[in-house]
Image (cartoon, helix red, strand yellow):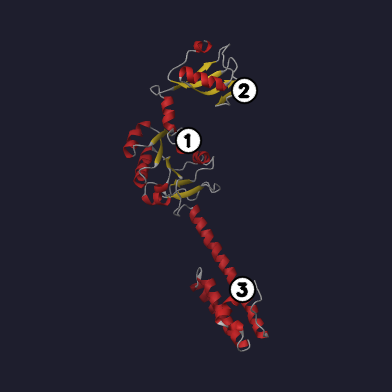
Amino acid sequence: MYFLIQRLSRFARLRLHGWRLPLSVAALVFVTSWLAMALVEPPGSEIVRPDTYWWYFVITSATVGYGDVFPVSTGGRIVGSLVVVGGIVTLTLLFTQLADALQSVRGRRTRGVVALDLSEHVVLIGYWPGRTQRIIAELTAEGRNQVVLCAWDDVAENPVPDEPAVHYVRGDLTREDVMVRACVDRARTVVIDGRDDNETLAIAVAVDHAHPAVHLVAAVRDLGRQESLRYVNPGVQVVQWHMPFLLTEEATDPGITQVYNDLMSSSGHGNTYSVRVPAGFGHATFGECQTFFGRTFGATVLALRGEAGLRVSPPWDEPVPAGSTLYYVAAGRIDGARLGA
């Protein structure tokens, strides 16, 4: 008997892998208990009917025991006890297998090898320790964006596993399979933060092939590569690599890079200037200053520096005392003497 049990145990370990083991145990317990119940219960017993026993088996195996169907003989009760034990063993095996399957899926997602199912998300291609974490923090700050981080194979696991809004994909960032797993064809924005400008250009080609109409943002070391990138995708927004904050702002609010570039360029439609508020200035609050600058000079006041320090876009009822500094956007510098007029 011991030899038979040992052989059966060895057979189960070698042949019954995965889900086959708990299902085989459940089938074995069901068939043997049904036959045993049919032998020990009185003839014509309802419990051994084919349309009844499966219900009794499931309820008893799960240790629920509604009591609507039950054995009446001593032998039947013994068989019922064996069904309970077999059910516990089966459920234990099933839950163990389920836990292993869930852990396997989670592990594959952590390793970045699972194809995702997302749309209207942001894809961040390229990983730099520290820098990428800061970019992700900005992208997810308002809770609006789902982010897919794509990294090369040398980043073995998701570097930000505690961020629920961040999904991970790894592989050759210039290959189609990475674009497919990251759902680039359904992305709202793709941000490329490559290791060098040549790599950024190669990734841009892959992204454009996967989704030509995507909002594409690329960080480059040399702004001279802008023309090459626009040859790939005319709508690409190019940001200097040392300005990661602009990457996130462009990804969140498309077109803002053009606004910055216009403001920073002497040939743009407007530049940023500052002016000190003279004594006797007839506009006591920030809102009044905003209205005055807009109507008189076609300018927009951005910020106020006073005793409390710099205030960007303060409330309109913020006092503007004499000696404060106003920062504004205009087509040209405003002569401070005109403020006292």
Q: How crowded is mark 2: few (under 14 residues within 10 Å), some or many (20 or more)?
A: few
Could you tell me if the residues under marks 2 and 3 are in contact, i.e. CB atoms within 8 Å? no
Q: In this figure, which residue is indicated by the disc labeled 1?
A: 249
Q: Can residue 330 be seen in this view?
A: yes
Q: How far apart are marks 2 and 3 (CA)?
A: 72 Å
Q: What element carries label 3?
A: helix
Circle on res. 121: none
Residue identified by numbered label 2: 308
Relative image position of residue 334 (x, y in whole percent): 47, 15
88 w.r.t. 228: above or below: below
Query: Is residue 3 in view from this perspective?
Result: no
Contact (Cβ within 8 Å) of mark 3 with mark 1:
no
Q: Where is residue 102 in the image (x, y as percent from the top left)?
A: 53, 60
Gap in angstroms between the C-alphas marked 3 and 1: 58 Å
> Disc 2 residue type?
Ala
Question: Which three-letter amino acid code belongs to the residue tagged 1?
Answer: Glu
Q: In this view, does 46 lie above or below 204?
A: below
Judged from the image, the secondary structure of the residue bearing numbered disc 1 is helix
Neighbor class of circle 1 (other Cα within 10 Å; few <14, some 14-19, many 20+) is some
Query: Residue 121: x, y in percent?
Result: 46, 45
> What's under tag 3, amino acid-wise?
Ile
